[in-house]
Amino acid sequence: MTNFKEAFGLFDRVGDSQVAYNQIADIMRALGQNPTNKDVLKVLGNPSADDMANKRINFDTFLPMLKQVHALPKGTYDDYVEGLRVFDKEGNGTVMGAELRIVLSTLGEKMNEQEVESLMAGQEDENGSVHYEGQHSCSLPSLFVFDFSEI
């Protein structure tokens, strides 16, 4: 539990042991979760844009939200492969990195340029292709590895 609290504290920019609503998704992702923005808004009670910028919560309020997100169904490796296969024009287990960047930044829950570059770092070969078949480990960044059995 201490590790979760320490990670939460890293996002406390004011020093009042609280974080802004608009930081909740980032904290959850730093803790190894991958909620959609819609999932985060739902656990926050669908707050207004003003509330997202101005409301703050403490760790005790955050923890049940983290548990809810952790309990959500996760995408499997096969789900990711199937999603990438849609963009595999040659049917050879690769997608063009440039096309993947466009997809990540324009479709669904759009990623910003920094998020896309962070995800794509080291994934392209010398031809600009991303090999997704046979890549059994996903390189989603996480600041820490946490044992969710302790919450």
Image (spheres, rainbow, N blue to C red):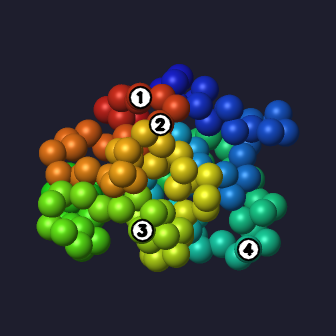
| Residue 64 to residue 96: above or below | above
Q: Nearer the viewer, mark 1 or mark 4?
A: 1
Residue name at image x 73 percent, y 74 percent: 49
Disc 4 crowd rating (10 Å Cα; few below 14, some 14-19, many 20+) is few
Q: Closest to the observer: 75 or 146?
A: 75
Dot 3: element: helix
Q: CA distance from mark 1 to mark 4?
A: 31 Å
Mark 1 and mark 3 residues within 8 Å of each other at the beta carbon = no
Residue name at image x 41 percent, y 29 percent: 146
Q: Nearer the viewer, mark 4 or mark 2?
A: 2
Residue name at image x 58 percent, y 44 percent: 27
Give the mark, 3 or 2, whose residue is nearer the N terminus: 3
| Residue 14 to residue 132: above or below | above
Q: Which residue is mark 1?
A: 145
Q: Is residue 97 visible?
A: yes
Q: CA distance from mark 3 to mark 2?
A: 25 Å
Mark 4 and mark 2 residues within 8 Å of each other at the beta carbon = no
Q: Which residue is mark 2?
A: 142
